[in-house]
Each structure stands twice: as structure tokens, then as C-alpha cells.
Image (cartoon, helix red, strand yellow):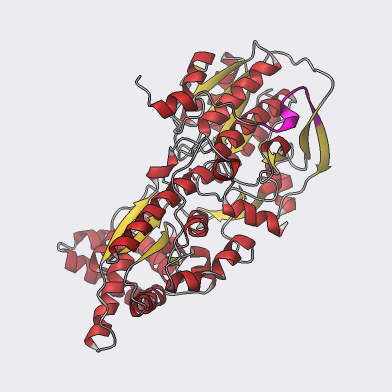
Amino acid sequence: MTKSALQIERAKYAPKMPKALQGNVKIVSGENTESVADQEDIKRIFPNTYGMPLVSFEASEVSKLFPEMNVGVILSGGQAPGGHNVISGLFDGLKKLNKNNKLYGFLGGPSGLVSHKYLELTADIIDEYRNTGGFDIIGSGRTKLEEEEQYDKGLEICKKLSINAIIIIGGDDSNTNACVLAEYYLQKKSGVQVIGCPKTIDGDLKNKLIETSFGFDTACKVYSELIGNIMRDANSAKKYWHFIKLMGRSASHIGLECALQTQPNVCLISEEVAAKDQTLQQIVDDLVQIIINRAANKENFGVALIPEGLIEFIPEMKTLIAELNELLAEGHATAEAFNAQVTDDEKRDYVISHLANDTSKVFKSLPKGIAKQLTLDRDPHGNVQVSRIETERLLIEMVEKRLSVLKKQGDTKVKFSALNHFFGYEGRCAAPSNFDADYCYSLGQTAALLVAEGKSGYMASVQNTTAPSEQWVAAGVPITMMMNMERRHGLMKPVIQKALVNLDAAPFKAFAIQRSEWALRTSYVYPGPIQYWGPAAVCDAPTKTLMLEKEDI
Ligand code: FBP
């Protein structure tokens, strides 16, 4: 396989590690834990994994001998930069503990465990993937592990390969499932441990002990580079407004971090829209006002960042989507009647006449194309696939419409020319930044230690990440500690609490106090591409989100 010059040099990078992991290591047990909420329910559902103590790893004078063990690893969900380094850290960690240890990778995500598709990961394979982006070493998938039948199939292959532990690298849902699996295997006295690792570019799997999910750092840096480039173009040509949608299925952490890095004219934060109970029209009106103000200031151009999940956070849109889901649910008479309408206009009229009054008004106010999109594309659960809705186009169309009304009334003469972009896949498989390369490698090493110490139902955790990596702390956090009960598909389920943007925390506050200045006066910052070699201030700095969150502690 031909490699780029950067790939060849980057393969030689030795990830920096916490001092405590560099030599002999001992485990230290801390306090017993409680779940963040709903303690009684979580305790009842997880009798074997509830209340376990926090653990951390410290340097030791004594070298400990560990028996041979085999471990299986699974990549779950969307790609995130650094996954290959978790696996290489895990591999090196296992070999350090006992050179006969083996690592198996289950192929294509959690389904590989159930369908017994695997590969033994040898040194040759691992060396090909060190410090690279992507999940292609073993592939990933979105199959959920939630049925006992799947757990039992998993156990079969673990027995066959003498696997002592499974490492699940995933987001909040995958780690919730990892904990359920850990509990089940303990209850069965199967001897198979389960350890989770925090992954997702979305940055919404975090708490006081899991400081960040891996991949967030690199993905935000890639998007910020691209946004900066577009800003420089906008500021050179001075004729376009760029509307940029940024990935992040639900939370707006990516948008917020990119805003802190680049200082755009607008950055919408879904959590704020929901908290302020804003309507789509209010969002559009605010945008229009900024456009008019900038034009009056002779800056008729701009950059607006839009989080992918916005639509679902606008209360009136949420109601509309819920009503549409109900109206068009497979098997419902209304869905059949809708499908029997022949033309697009007939279908539109049918929907309008069957929605509640207020919701029907919202539906009518949407550009026809977007309204139609809401009645199409449903996922296997019958829900609208909101991530496919082109929110950035929707906002452009609605801004154009509003400006044309204002022009007709003689209230403005502003010429508005907009371009739309969507950044997501551009960053998910980027070569990990030094932060992610180091963080992931340490997570992998920590996971190996948790397995060796017989732990199950823990998430690997690396803390103190705003300090130089030598001072990072390797630890294990019981997954039940992060759980609460939430309604999912009509039933109360134990799940890891998702971390949305906290409007009272330092990152949002830092943005909020500067945004009106950024809106009016061009204040762009151009971060440039990720640097792998050079001054630490350029190469090793964590995200602004992480730095600001430290101020809150
Ligand atoms: P994970 O939460 O699984 O890490 O995935 C995050 C994400 O990248 C979201 O930002 C995005 O909405 C989604 O995956 C897209 O996934 P897919 O490409 O599978 O549709």
C-alpha cells in the first residue's frame, strides 16, 4: 500500500503517556460509588456492578506477574480519530503485562461478536495502524447489543477463543450496553469481563471523571481549520454568507468548540434554543438582523455555524416531528390515506389538514422542499431522520424569504448571497491530533490494566488532561456511576446520562459574552491545519472546551 510522506513519519510517533503508566504499576481503590440519579432502580438492575469503587493506577516499585489472558476488542458506532491508538495502546499494554497475551478484534462492530467474525491482531497488523485515523483496522458498526441471545452468542466465541475480557470502544449507548453485558456475564459467572472506552466526535460522553470523549479534539480542529479557510475567503471576497452545518447528532459541543476556535458571526447552540423556547422564525429573524447590521457596517458577508441537531431542539419543530411520526406511522390508517394521495400538493394538503392547528401553521411556514422531506425518509422505528434534513439550506431559504418581505416593505436594501456547507465526514477519520493520539493510547493501556486487575463494568478513564501528559492520571470509573433512568421507546431504561452543552458552564459563557461583538465586527481567527511536530503550544493544546471546563472545577 502506498503511503504519504506524513503517514510514514507519523507512524514513528511514540504517544506520550502518564508517568504512572511508564514503568511498574499498582492499582489503588478509592471510594465506593453511587449512580448520578435513580440510585434504587440502577442498584436493582445492576446488582453485580453497582456501587463499585473508583480505581486509579500509580507507579510502583514492584513488578507484578499477571497470568496469560486473551482479550477481544470492538469498535462501535461512528468513526472518531484515535480509535486505532486505543487498540495499539491496548495491544502494547497487554504485551507488557504478559508477552503471551493475545488480542482479537471483532469485525464490523458489535455484530462481529454475535456472528463470530474476528481477527487476531498481531504486531504486524497493529504497526500498520499506529497514529492513523479511521476504524478500518477491524471496522465498526451500529448493531446494538441488547438481547440475551446476542450476549450468549458472544459468550460462545469468548469460550472458544479463551477470551477473558471484551473492550467496547463506543459512545454513551454502546457503553450503556457494555455495562449491561458486564452485569449479565457476572451474573452468569462466565469469567468474561467487559470494559468500555469513551469515544465520539460529538463530545457528549463526558462528566467529571471522563473529561472528554476521544475524537472530539481532532474533529473540532479539522472543522475549525476548514471554517477558518472559509472565513478568510469570505473576508477576501466580501460577497457571501456561508452557512455551515456541523456534525453532532444531538449536542452542540462541536459547534461551540469551533466557535471558540474561530470566532464566527453566528453560532447557534441547540441547547440554548430549547432553553429559550425559541421558534424557527425567531432564529431566522435574529439572523436577518445580524445580516442587516453587518451590511450597514459595510460587511455584507459572514459565517454562521449551525449544529446538526438543531431541528430537534426547536420546541415547535419537535412537536411537529412528533405529530408527523404519529400521523405517518406504518400501519396507521392516516399513513395509508397519505400514501394514497397522488401529487405532492395533495400530500401536503392532507398533512396540513390533519395536524393540530399550531403545528399545521409551522408546517405551512416551512419551505415546501423541507416540509416534504419531513414527510419522507423514516428510520426503521418510523421516526423522521432529522440528521438528513438540510437545516443550513432551510435557514438560508427562510432568511431569503424574510429579507424579500422586508425589501418589499422598503425596510432594507440588503443583497443576500449565501452558500451552504456540511462538515462531518471530513473530520471523523482524520489522523489524530497529538492530544487524541496520546489520550487514546493511554486509554488503551488503562483498559489493559483494568482487565489484568479483574475489573468489569468499568470505563477506562484518563484524567487531568489539561496538564502535560506526564501528569495525566489513569483510572477506572464504574459505568453504573454515570447512569440514570430515561424513557426509551416507551419504557424506562438505565442509560448513561448524555452531556449536552451546559449553559451555565464556562465554555458557553465564554462564547456568550463575545458573540455580539463577533456578530457585528469581523473578528475571525484562522487556526490552520493540525500540526504534529513543533512547539507544544501549537501541537499539544487540548480543546478550548476542555481548558474552560477546568476553570469550573
Ligand atoms: P457516534 O455517536 O456513534 O460516535 O457517532 C457520531 C456521529 O458522527 C454524529 O455526529 C453523526 O450524526 C452520526 O455519527 C452520523 O452517523 P452515520 O454516518 O452512521 O449516519
Residue 439's place in the image compared with 11, above or below, is below
Residue beneath the point at 28% across and 56% down = 376
Q: In the image, ligand 1 is in what quadrant?
A: top left
Q: Is residue 331 visible?
A: no
- Where, quadrant-wise, is the C terminus in this rendering? bottom right
Residue 455 at what x, y percent from top left? 72, 30
Q: Residue furthest left?
A: 343
Residue beneath the point at 68% across and 17% down = 96
Residue 166's place in the image compared with 47, above or below, is above
Q: Nearer the viewer, residue 462 or 156?
A: 462
Residue beneath the point at 74% across and 51% down = 40
Residue 128 at what x, y percent from top left? 46, 20
Residue 143 at what x, y percent from top left? 46, 36
Q: Residue furthest front?
A: 535
Is 203 displayed left or right of 526 in the figure? right
Is 437 displayed left or right of 530 in the figure? right
Q: Quadrant of residue 241?
A: bottom left
Q: Nearer the viewer, residue 498 or 552?
A: 552
Magenta stretch in the rendered image: 17-27
Q: Is residue 20 magenta?
A: yes
- Where, quadrant-wise, is the N terminus in this rendering? top left
- The image shows a total of numbered marks equal to 0
Q: Quadrant of residue 307?
A: bottom left
Is 89 displayed left or right of 343 in the figure? right
Residue 102 at what x, y percent from top left? 60, 15
Q: Is residue 128 visible?
A: yes
Q: Nearer the viewer, residue 234 or 257?
A: 234
Q: Is residue 235 magenta?
A: no
Residue beneath the point at 39% across and 75% down = 290
